[in-house]
Amino acid sequence: MKVIITGAAGFIGSHLTERCLALGWDVVAIDSLTTYYSPAVKVRNAQGFHAHHRCTYLEQDLLDLDLVALFADANVIFHLAAQAGVRASWGQSFDVYTQLNVTVLQRALEAARHAEGLTRFVFVSSSSVYGEAEALPTSEEQILRPVSPYGATKALGEHLSYLYYRNYGVPVVMLRYFSVYGPRQRPDMAFYRAIEAALQRRDFVLYGDGLQTRDFTFVEDAVEGTIRAADSGHPGRAYNIGGGSRISMLDVLQIVRRELPGLVVRHAEGQQGDARDTAADVRLARSHFGYEPSWDVERGLLEQMKWHRARN
């Protein structure tokens, strides 16, 4: 089995790369080390696999590579490369989001249609495509109404993916991740910021009143769902990958405080583009490829805090 992983040195991508290697697969891992957050973080993430004997690691921009040649003998492509972040996607930075979340995806899909042995092209989307969902938990049949430019680029990415499935038979499976957390989480994400603030005796800035809720997904569950989707996901379909642990930010901070009593919270106004509540209906993923999240938020947070302590 030969797999391509784009965004391989990122938070989720690095975990996925290590899992694929543990399964005995040959991996081409690609990451351009974009500067949305420190490239040094991604360099550390890649330390667990960049020298592995079954891994070819490329620190290159996908737009600079001959993707047709690179994908030619691939069995599975995991496309995680993207510009992340809801709050940063407004204003002039939107050009970066369209380039990295839309143009790069289109080039990858175009190359993938020439890969004769390809069984799945797994496109990682986001729960941000739903915006303020009309129903909770939210099923894949919900109309996509993103409330941020980031979410809009992910929704467009899904439409592009479906076009390549319908017109060229590219076996695309789309995954809508819900608020993934765990070791190696991106530095801009709330769990990371809260834990680091507590460890370093700094204030943690909480946007909004803290009553907003999220369906938080531990990274190992996200990776498990991704691997299963590559094996048995139905091409042309989108699937929710959630954690089954909808909880408010205030309750999350109480869990952190039990372990790290020094946490001080400072409230700030809510940010444009942040959905009030999210919750994943994962029945379709359960039915099609047996996805079942196994980590609750408290257990997952303890694991993430252990990782932070080891770094400080």
Image (cartoon, grey):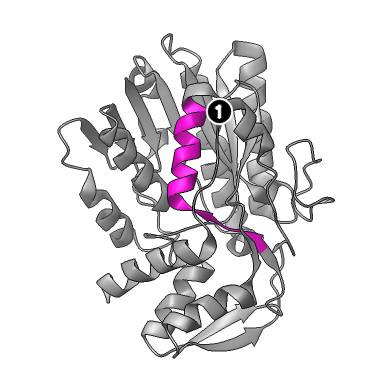
Secondary structure at numbered mark 1: helix
Is residue 60 among the parts visible in the rendering? no
In this rendering, the answer to whether 156 lies above or below 76 is: below
Residue at the far right in the pictured view: 134
Magenta residues, start to end: 214-230
Image location of residue 153, percent across then percent down: 64, 44
Instruction: Give the residue displayed 58% in from the left and 58% down from the top.
Output: 216
The image quadrant of residue 155 is: top right
Quarter residue 5 falls in: top left
Residue position marked by numbered label 1 in the rendering: 289
Image vertical order of residue 167 relative to residue 156, above or below: above
Measured from the top left, where is residue 90 in percent x and y? 65, 61
Task: State whether the magenta stretch is mostly helix, strand or loop.
Answer: helix
Task: Count up the numbered dots.
Answer: 1
Check the image and report above or below for 112 versus 91. above
Give the amino acid at mark 1. Phe
Placement of 37 over or under 121, stated as above or below: below
Depth check, front residue: 185 or 301: 301
On the picture, is 175 further left or further right than 64?
A: right
Residue in the foreground of this view, choosing between 275 and 259: 259
Q: Residue 56's spot in the image, x, y percent? A: 23, 32
Q: Is residue 232 visible?
A: yes
- Looking at the rendering, in which quadrant would you find the N terminus? top left
Residue 216 within the segment the image draws in magenta:
yes
Q: Which residue is drawn at 25% across and 57% down?
A: 44
| Residues packed near mark 1 inside 10 Å, few (<14), some (14 to 19) or many (20 plus) | some
In depth, the one of 29 and 243 nearer the eye is 243
Left or right of 43 on screen, residue 7? right
Q: Residue at x 66, y 24 (%)?
A: 162
Q: In which quadrant of the rendered image does the C terminus lie?
A: bottom left
Rendered location of residue 101, percent (x, y): 56, 42
User: Image quadrant of residue 142?
Assistant: top right
